[in-house]
């Protein structure tokens, strides 16, 4: 099994920057793609970005491209989401996810492992 733990969330002001880490443990050698999703109350879980095992391939949702960046530190088994120019509509529970094969999929059903989420609240 793989365990994923997100952190770094909190209350920020519109326009602020925030970086979310996601630490992976367990059978991390089995992980290939890792991704970020978010879910606001009353909405479906939304894909944000995914990165391949090597870190050389990424896929970022149109809705956040240019503001959000996904990266990873393989040595630390840690995934990151850097969020710039935050807006009140970015308020959501942010989830880290992982799967065992390469596809850069934006679909939630493709991901086997999920963290518990970290709350990001952006105040105007």
Image (tube, rainbow, N blue to C red):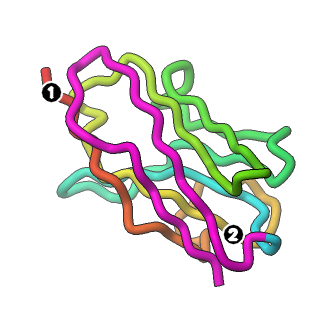
Q: Main secondary structure of the magenta part?
A: strand
Give how far apart the Cα atoms at labels 2 and 1 are: 33 Å
Q: Are marks 2 and 1 in contact (CB under 8 Å)?
A: no
Q: Residue extending furthest front? A: 76
- Labelled disc at residue 115: none
Give the residue at mark 2. Answer: 99
- Labelled disc at residue 123: 1
As for residue 11 lying within the magenta part, the answer is yes
Dot 1 falls on a residue whose secondary structure is: strand
Q: Does the image show residue 109?
A: yes
Question: From the viewer's perspective, is 24 left or right of 11?
Answer: right
Q: Quadrant of the N terminus?
A: bottom right
Tell me residue 113's x, y (percent): 57, 74
Q: Is residue 73 above or below residue 39?
A: above
Q: Residue at x 73, y 78 (%)?
A: 27
Magenta region: 1-28
Q: Residue extending furthest left? A: 124
């Amino acid at each position: 099994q793989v365990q994923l733990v997100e952190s770094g969330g909190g209350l920020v002001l519109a326009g602020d920057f925030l970086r979310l880490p996601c630490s992976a443990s367990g059978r991390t050698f089995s992980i290939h793609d890792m991704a970020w999703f978010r879910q606001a109350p009353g909405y479906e879980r939304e894909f944000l970005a995914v990165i391949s095992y090597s870190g050389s391939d990424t896929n970022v949702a149109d809705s956040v491209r240019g503001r959000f960046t996904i990266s990873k530190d393989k040595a630390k088994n840690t995934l990151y989401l850097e969020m710039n120019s935050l807006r009140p509509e970015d308020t959501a529970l942010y989830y880290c996810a992982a799967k065992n094969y390469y596809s850069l999929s934006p679909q939630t059903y493709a991901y086997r492992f999920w963290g518990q989420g970290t709350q990001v609240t952006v105040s105007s």
